[in-house]
Amino acid sequence: MKLNKKMLSGIVVILLILTGNYVVMDTAKETPSEQTADDRTSIEVQRVIDGDTIVFKEAGQEYKMRLLLIDTPESSTTKTGSVQPYGKEAKDFLINYLKGKTLTIEYEPTQKRTDKYGRVLAYLFADGTLVQEILVQEGLARVGYEEGQEVYLDQLLAAEQVAAREQRNIWSIKNYVGEYGFNEK
């Protein structure tokens, strides 16, 4: 049987599609849901640990999540020995902001979906609005832990510039926001 160019092209396309689907399905299994990076998954927040960490439930399973690309001051004494300035405000703001909203998460295609502590790393959306951006705009979080190619990085950096220029909250304390966290005051 002689194959013409159209048939051969069709077979190659089908093989590529089948192979590509296998790779995508195989790599998606390391996260709580089997969503693709373009999708958002509905979640239910169980509790807010601090301004950048929550516990959520998806399909009956609980997960701890670190909000991707932001860092808020500590709201408890566990890590730093004392509550950091604006740590409690960041936590309280997040608790109140999330109330009554439809919550979804989205994974960053350029980063792993979990960290070395087993926490989910994702973007959090409340009624379609990026929660990380709201925290940064309010001056309750700084941009951090970025690798440079993230989907929402430019958006977050722009919000951070405005908050810093207007000296909102964490930016109101001279030299408080450092490159790798918050300086003791």
Image (spheres, helix red, strand yellow):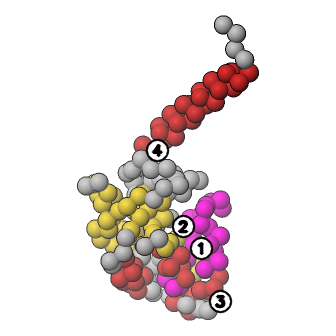
- Secondary structure of the residue carrying tag 2 is loop
Marks 1 and 3, how far apart in space? 14 Å
- The tag earlier along the polypeptide, 1 or 3, is 1
Magenta span includes 135: no
Mark 4 nearby-residue class (10 Å; few <14, some 14–19, many ≥20): some
Labels 3 and 4: the sequence-earlier one: 4
Residue with the mark numbered 1:
156
To which residue does mark 4 refer? 28
126, 79: nearer the viewer: 126
Q: Are marks 3 and 2 in contact (CB under 8 Å)?
A: no
Q: Check residue 157 for magenta coloring.
A: yes
SS type, badge 4: helix
Residue mark closest to the camera, 1 vs 3: 1
Q: Tell me the CA gap for discs 2 and 1.
A: 8 Å
**Chain part drawn in magenta:** 138-160
Question: Label 1: few (<14), some or many (≥20) within 10 Å?
Answer: many
Q: Position of residue 126 (x, y in %)?
A: 42, 72
Q: Rounded to the nearest whole Å, what is the CA distance between mark 1 and mark 4?
A: 26 Å
Residue 103 is left or right of residue 17, and the answer is left
Please give the name of the residue rendered at 65% of the width and 82% of the height, measured from the top-left corner: 161
Q: Nearer the viewer, residue 46 or 84?
A: 46
**How many neighbours does mark 2 have within 10 angstroms: few (below 14), some (14-19), or many (20 or more)?**
many
The label on residue 165 is: 3
Indicate which disc, 1 or 4, sits on the residue closer to the N terminus.
4
First reached walking from the N terminus: tag 4 or tag 2 = 4
Residue farthest along the top direction in this orientation: 1
Q: Quadrant of residue 136?
A: bottom right
Circles 2 and 1 in contact, beta carbons < 8 Å: yes
Tell me the kind of residue under disc 1.
Leu
Question: Which residue type does callout 2 highlight?
Answer: Leu
Specify the amino acid type for callout 3. Arg
Foreground residue among 179 and 165: 165
